Structures are given as C-alpha cells and as structure tokens.
Image: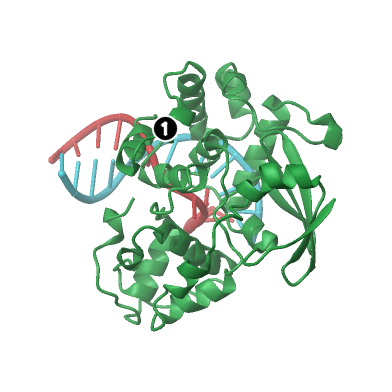
Chain colours: A green, B red, C cyan
Amino acid sequence: MGTYHIEHFDPEAIALSGQCFRMHILAPGRVEVIHRGRRVEIAVLGEDAFAFSCSDAEFENVWRHFFDLETDYRPFLEAIDKTDHYLTCAAEAGRGLRILRQDPWEVLISFILSQRKSIPAIRDNVEKLCRRFGEPLAEYGPDVFAFPTPQALAGASMEELSACSLGYRAPYVRAAAISVAAGQTDLPALSGLDDEALLQSLLSLYGVGVKVARCVMLFGYHRLCAAPVDVWIGRVIDQEYGGVSPFARYAGFCGVIQQYMFYQRITAKRPEKPAAQKNLPSGASHAIHL
DNA sequence: TGCCAGGCTTCAC
DNA sequence: GTGAAGCATGGC
C-alpha cells in the first residue's frame, strides 16, 4: 500500500468515462481496476492524494503507465478555446480524466461488443466473458477473473459466446479472436504503424468499423489524435456546434477533447436542447479525423 | 409496448 | 459510392 500525490487524476470520473469496462466504483472514493491479470484498489484520500493497494514497485512498473501519469494534461486544458463555453465546462468537469493505456486486445473485444449497447450493458457483457473464459485470479479473491486470452475466445463455440449475451456481435468477437490467436493480426506489432496504417489494419477486421477502430486506437494504442464519433458525440456536434466538429482545432490530441465532451454528455441529465448555433469554430467536419 | 444504446454488414440502387 | 434495412439484448 502506497500513497501518492497525483494532479489531474480522478479515478471515479475515469471509471464512468466509458473508456474502460473493468474499472468499478466500489464505494464513494474507492475504485478497483483489473488490467493484464492484476487488480488494484485506489482510495481517494483528499485533493490530489491517493492510496494504491499495491507495492511501490508495482505502482511504478504497472499503474503509473496504465493511468498515463507520465503525461502532463495541463497543455491540453490550456489549449481549449476560452470562447467555447460547452468545451470549457466539459473540460472543467472532466479535468481528472486521463486516456488509459489499456491492452489493445481487451479494448478491441470490448468495443466490438459495445455496438448499440449502453455502457452498463457492455460492462455486464465483458464481465460475463471474463467469468466464462478468463483465468481466475485467486490471489485477489474467488470472484476475480482476467480478461480472456485470444486463444480462449478463439476456442469458444458460437453457442458459448452467445450465452454471454453478445447477440449479433458474437461472430465479430469470434472472428477477431481467431485472427489474433492465429497470428494473422499481430496486435503488439500494430503499435509500430503510423496512424493511418493502424486505422486500416483495424478496419480490416470483421465487425470493426471506423468508430470501433478509433476507440481501439485511442484507448488501446494511445493515439491521442483519434476521436471516436458515436451517437453521443454526434449529438454534441449537432446541438452545440451546428453540425461542425470542433476537433480540427485540436490536432494531435482531439481524442482527449473528445473524452471531455463524451464524459460531459453522459454525466449530464440528458438535456434535449434543440440544435443551437452557439459554437461555430472554423474547421472541417469531424469525418476527416482519425 | 416502443425506443434506445460508445455500429457494422449487407444489399439495393 | 451512397443510403436504408437488418441485426440481439436489456434497461427504461
């Protein structure tokens, strides 16, 4: 158990932000994460003060990197257009968000099955997969499981996958698992590709479209230039920006900006405002962004 | 009962 | 190349 002073870090906000489905709020100020066969609990002690339920060595070797604590998020916040009221408020609400450095394989499968599902439903599906096909992590308790390996999912039948409530996404998950397990898709090697090549490689997988590919790029490969546009972000762009994406202004880190917008949108009380012409930054449509 | 959820593939045209 | 239809499941 170690205690640390960390700025711009809000584990509860990150757990709610929809980028990671194995991060749970256990109680106010207490969050757990399971990542690459390890589990850690984080306790919020006070402003910028946190306790991690692991050794200092594990914090330095695993969790500092996972939570992207080496990155200074201040320049991202300072670059936000002060006349953009929506984004200024969103960034203030989400100033403790960070883009996690997750396992690309876990991100790939999680976002394949995210299609047309709510975040709680995705979380349930991921947990079902882990319980059914993941290795038990007995050192953390009888009810803790690792994310399934590609081999484990590739060896599952359609019936077994469908039993995890995957619906029509079951063949997508199976195809991706077979491709990765067979070495046809080498996920670690993809990290060496440039952004466009990485995008095209991900799009070649059955069941992976532009939105899911961008999620994998952002959350699995830490390509901060990738900004997934889903129904929520689409609504923000329509309602707050008159249909013109603000991402062009934030080249190189629009994935971070997107995450502030997404968090603000899903944690708001869903005010269904009519389309407004409030923020109209110059720039191209969001469609051109990775 | 109907609509919607971090969409994608398939098939007309 | 573009747009609509169809797709499973669960929550509200």
**In the rendered view, does A269 fall on the left or right side of A4?**
left
Q: Nearer the viewer, residue A287 or A48?
A: A48
Q: Amino acid at mark 1?
A: Leu
Residue A190, position in %: x, y?
A: 41, 32
Residue at the spot x=41%, y=82% of the render? A82
Residue at disc 1, secondary structure: helix
Residue at the spot x=52%, y=29% of the render? A170
Within the image, what quadrant is residue A39 found in? Answer: top right
Within the image, what quadrant is residue B10 found in? Answer: top left
The residue that mark 1 highlights is A190
Residue at the spot x=47%, y=60% of the render? A256
Q: Nearer the viewer, residue A208 or A66?
A: A66
**In the rendered view, does A77 fall on the left or right side of A146?**
left
Is residue A268 visible in the rendered image? The answer is no
Is residue A218 visible in the rendered image? The answer is yes
Residue A5, position in %: x, y?
A: 73, 64
Residue A85, position in %: x, y?
A: 44, 82
